Amino acid sequence: MRKTSILFIILTIVWMIVIFCFSNQQSDESKNTSSDVTKKIVNIIYKNTLSEQEKETKIEELNPVIRKLAHYTIYTIGGIIICMTLTTFEVQTKNKILVTQAIGSMYAITDEIHQYFVPREKLSNKGYIY
């Protein structure tokens, strides 16, 4: 096996681990992470042109968009890495696209199943909502 094949296999595994770690966050922790990113984006774009209340409104409006873009971006990166891995094995283009789609889809499905078992919201002293 060539060194480039091994490198891309390792990158694919690292990508899967990163997604697993993000998916393993409870929903309130995940929302806080994306909210922090959204706050930074709003502060960069709007700088000192908005009041604190207007900034909070923008953050609430943009946070779902930022979360969707993050999902899209991380799976796009994964698709590129998987495709590059298959390229090192000299797979035909048509098969490369199909296998990349199959691997990405299967991983997304298993990720959704995994998320089902992660607690969603913490209730005061009564445990978690699933």
Image: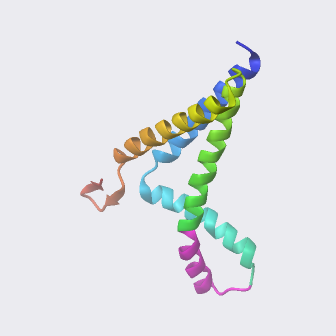
Q: Is residue 86 above or below residue 128?
A: above
Residue ranking furthest to the front = 94
Query: Could you tell me residue 86's position as x and y percent?
Result: 66, 27
Q: Residue at x 53, y 67 (%)?
A: 64
Residue ranking furthest to the top = 1
Q: Residue at x 36, y 55 (%)?
A: 120
Query: Could you tell me residue 42's position as x and y percent?
Result: 67, 73
Which residue occupies the foreground of this view, 1 or 130?
1
Q: How is the image coloured?
A: rainbow
Which residue occupies the foreground of this view, 3 or 79?
79
Q: Main secondary structure of the magenta part?
A: helix
Q: Residue at x 65, y 26 (%)?
A: 10
Q: Residue at x 73, y 86 (%)?
A: 49
Q: Is residue 44 above or below residue 126?
A: below
Give the image quarter of residue 52: bottom right
Q: Range of the magenta residues? A: 49-63
Q: Is residue 98 rendered magenta in the image?
A: no
Position of the N terminus by quadrant: top right
Query: Could you tell me residue 12's position as x and y percent?
Result: 62, 31
Give the image quarter of residue 112: top left
Q: Is residue 27 above or below residue 18?
A: below
Q: Is residue 67 left or right of residue 81?
A: left
Label total for image: 0
Query: Could you tell me residue 69's position as x and y percent?
Result: 60, 59
